[in-house]
Image: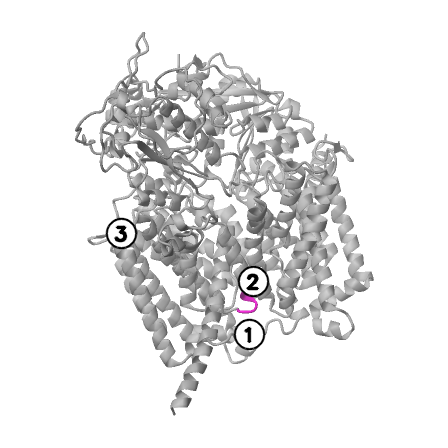
Amino acid sequence: MFRIRGTIAVLSAAVVLAAACGNSPSGDGAAPTPDTAAPTTAAPATTAADASEPDAAVEASESDASEPDEPTEPAVDEPASAEEASEPEAVDEPATAEAPEPETDAPAPTTTTEPVVEEPVDPYPHRHDFVPLEGVPGVTDDEIRVAVIGTETNNILGTCILPCFHTGIQAYFDYVNDAGGVYGRRLVIGELLDDELGFNQQRSLEVIDGNNSLAAFQATLLPLGWGPLNDAGIPTFTWNIHGAEAVNRDNIFGNHVIGCPTCTIRSFVWIVSQAGASRVGLLGYGVSETSKVCTKAFADSIDLYGPDLGMEVAYFNDNVAFGLPNGIGPEVTQMVDAGVDFIATCMDLNAMLTLAQELERQGVRDQITLLHPNSYDREFVAAAGDLFDGDYALLVFAAFEYEVDSPLRHAYDQWVPANGGPVAEQTLVGWINADLFVTGLLEAGPGFDRQSIIHSLNQITYDAGGLINPVDWSRQHTAVEPFVYDHAYALHCTSSVRMEGGTFVGFQPEPWMCWPGDTEEWSEPTPTDFAG
Amino acid sequence: MSGAAGFFEDLFRGLLQGTPPGAVYALIALGFVLTYKTSGVFNLAFGAQAYISAAMYFKAHTLWGWPKWAALVVSAFVLAPLIGLVLERLIFRHLRTASAVSKLVVALGLSVALPELFNQAARFTAVAGRQITGIMPDGSSVFYDPFGVYRFNRDELAMMAVALAATLLLAALFRFTMIGLAMRAVVESPRMTELSGINADRTSAFAWALSSTFAGLAGVLIAPRFNSLISTDFFTLVVIAVAAAAVGKLVSLPRALLGGLGLGWFIAVFNTFLPRWSGDHTWLRPFQENLTPSLPFVVLFAILVLWRAIGREREASDPLSGVDPPPPALAALERHPKLTLFTRLFGVGFVAVVGSVVWFRAGVLWMHLVTTAVIMAVIYLSVTVITGMAGQISLCQGTFAAIGGFTIFQMADRFNMSVLAAALLGAGVAAAVGALLSLPVLRLGGVWLAIATLAFAFFFDAVMVKFSWVGGGTTALLTGTRVPRPLVGPIDFASDRAFLVLAVVVLVVVSVVVIQLREGTVGRTLTALRGSEVAAASIGISAARARIVAFAVSAAIAGLGGALLSMHQQNVNYSTNFGPVNALFWLVIVVALGARTVEGAIQAGAAFALFEPLILKGDLLAWILRGDDHLPGLFPIPGSWRLVLFGMMAIQFARHPEGLVEHGKRRSAARINRWLEAREGAAS
């Protein structure tokens, strides 16, 4: 009994002590402070003014508070000439693809901050200026080394993640190196780390600990290492399917951003109208908060715009079991009973196959159109034959089926196949991430370091030569609820394709269909080509 | 159509829709019962065996292009029985007289190890969009509509036919054949069976080959229902099917069939009508939203808790099943005092050296790994209490840890509470949940207690985590479940070194608490209960109170550890850290190394965090060889091998329930004791 009393006494003292403690303000794990300045209603008039004055929006954004220190200019002893820089010393190189003929001499990573000019002018004339740098991790006189981390082993989705992501980055690096590299240095993937699904944090810490990489690239299913990389000040370029892990982290960049997870989605409603449907069924996974939110956003969109467009939500279920171990028969039956003629899901491509097969079983496949959020995989759709005929896929990048007159797209079409990679989403994500990284390097100037790259990127708007909806990195690291324009895309856009005969077919007049980002009012979309 | 007619048509359609998944549950339940009847093993590795055959079939047919019949023969009728024979010969033959709990732990170890072993050996991985095809030609695209309301495809018809035929054949095997009788006899008493002139080894081997063939067949038949082949899906299905097997009390094949079908029907009818009713009656909507994904686990939990015959089953079949021999005394209590002194000095010196190296030399990676090891040791001390001291198998320790993590997330996010105070609050909440959980499952004990706790873990995973006051809410949506580090006066634990000190302090405090408990009244009571619950009750010991205390304390420790882990990672990271299947590995690694001692928990924590980088990645060998360049080509070994190695080590639990480390200590202590005694004898 004495032991128990003693133990209780010690524990009680610990409780009292702990109650008197506080929480560390450092680190991004700190409880977020509500933005009292943020409006609580959607799209107020003032945000429209902000939209026309991007600089004002930048000033007003929260990113000021966490703005990195001004980059220090390194001592420039003797800038080397471009000629010298284009002939770097021989170094151990990973195997690279045989260089195809590039269409342009100098790859031009693209931003929309540059003025539009009639003649093609290299926005970065200093791209080959060599400046000796000391103390910059991953940078030698010959090389700029980066780390690539991703999921290959134990990939439960079975899709090509790390290998394709890596191929996209390597192809881009080959493309740049073939044109002389950057600042007289070759771009090299120094560390390629498979996180085996559960070791992302450990692999990221290996990169931090080794301090041999200037930047990190991440394509993972469990992004436990994004926080440490951000805290370590390492510019990190991601396959950004994990919006919550990237939000409020100024060193994390991606192929797109999720600025407003619960905002209504006009592109979705537009797809429903393109299908000529009126009664919509919605399905999402119960196990995934992201999937549930996505499903709810679809429902909110129909609720908001549907009455005017003759649409309504006829079935809603955001509690479907992941993996569909019990099939999806009862749900489909209920949707058929409810007269559903369009089903949108927030589920993976494997689930879409199961759903389509169940629709076929119940004899309604040709009466119901599906919207696929994650099925943009040519092999997958080809293997399904005509099962998906008439369905739509919604993308966050310009679909390959649309002509994008951009040097970046043309180079991708050449260099990725030359590296043995498929023309597919994940290689494109790697390619775009690599271009964003190089853009940061070029923006930072020849005396670059990690901080200056981050600082430079966080001042520009980037559109990957029209391959993605432009991201204003000065304000779009932040996500807020409810919607405010300050942290959302300037334009809300989609690039959608239809499935026919086991292939994808473009049906939009331009790669993108866009709506104004400063309002949630319904309007017909504007065909847009960001590369034009 | 009138309302009543529509209702009955919907009901009938629901029943038809529930029949294929019901047949799935029935198939697994039949295999489960078959294994239990023929080996006495509560075979949670059944799903792993089914997975291997399904993956082999997929690889042979879909990837290699073999004909379906050839792929089926190799995967279900060659590979599956071969695995069964190997398991019987190497493992279960030696466990025939072991306790049911020991066999359960061995099966758990296999369920962790076997899928990874196959994946690594066969280089198998899931392939997106390429589902496994059933055994029938055009199995998924040719439909039959016998009643005009629902169409079955060929594969489903084949599956239902196999389930029915298997029930009839297996029932006939046990009822009418000598081999069936012999298989049951071997489970009851191998020695008596041998005396009757039956070769128990051969009979047991046949039983394992048969039950494993059934697992393989079930795996191949079931696989087309999955989007992609993932071993955890098969494990989850087994957990669901246990409810069907429980209907037959693990011995009745027809009742297992009915249990499986009934479960499928119930879920389908529930899913058909509840959404409709909740549209009319909004108060039903929370039930519909939350019960739909968790229904199988709720049913399983309800069967175990509410059906009193389950708890009485073991007494009815085996009067000695509740009487285990008392565990051997700890090595530290038996060894020579000089050896104890030397061991402690060595331990202190080792910790001092390692601590110094970590403190002065470790970078961010190793600081993180060592801190993780310390925190996992805290969590594993919860297993020490519930399994090592109380002799109970709890498979929801991850859930208790998650409660601690979510508590600090919610308290810090909503009330800006100190995370240290929130961690203690989380431990308290976990203790309360643990105590409440122990009330309905108290009478179960043994394997049923383990399954009940597993069902609770899956229920928490399917339902509770999504509530805004647990793991959801606006903040979680926007920025995830991030949590801050604590701040105590001038000490900011955002520093990794400072946080390591905090973790070590917590480990020391919890270790002292556990030792106090073990050596105090509670520990002695639990030891008495482990020996014989009846004898303990006869001297006035309240089994109920002791188990509630054990559950509560164990849950509190897990909750505290979970909170600490969340602070360390600055995020709860529920699915990575605390998911029900992930947490199974915790039990496996602790029982493999030593569930009865604090040292065992610490060693398990170190193994969890450091085995992969030190051993598998080759850092230790590289350090010995003075550089990565000298490492053999097989390094780095994939991290998944740790699941294989520790899973395999767990199969030693039946022989050495004290754990391999404690067993090693006992052996070396005995050897040194003999040497010391001989030396002292010679001197005198």
Q: Residue at x 18, y 32 (%)?
A: A72
- Specify the principal SS of the magenta part: loop
Element carrying mark 3: loop
| Residue lying furthest top | A118
Judging by the rendered image, the residue that carries numbered circle 2 is B651
Give the vertical position of A457 relative to B585 (above or below).
Answer: above
Judging by the rendered image, the residue that carries numbered circle 1 is B533
Foreground residue among A379 and B158: A379
Residue type at tag 3 = Phe
Task: Assess whether mark 2 and mark 1 are in contact (beta carbons under 8 angstroms).
Answer: no
Q: Note whether residue B457 is visible.
A: yes
Chain for mark 2?
A: B
Element carrying mark 1: helix
- Decide whether residue B655 is among the magenta residues: yes
Give the foreground label among 3 and 1: 3
Foreground residue among B97 and B22: B97
For residue B353, the mark is none
Task: Assess whether mark 2 and mark 3 are in contact (beta carbons under 8 angstroms).
Answer: no
Give the vertical position of B338 relative to B446 (above or below).
Answer: below
Q: Which residue is drawn at 55% across and 65% down?
A: B652
Element carrying mark 2: helix
Quarter placement of the C terminus of chain A: top left
Q: Position of residue B278 (x, y in %)?
A: 56, 38
Q: Note whether residue B379 is visible.
A: no
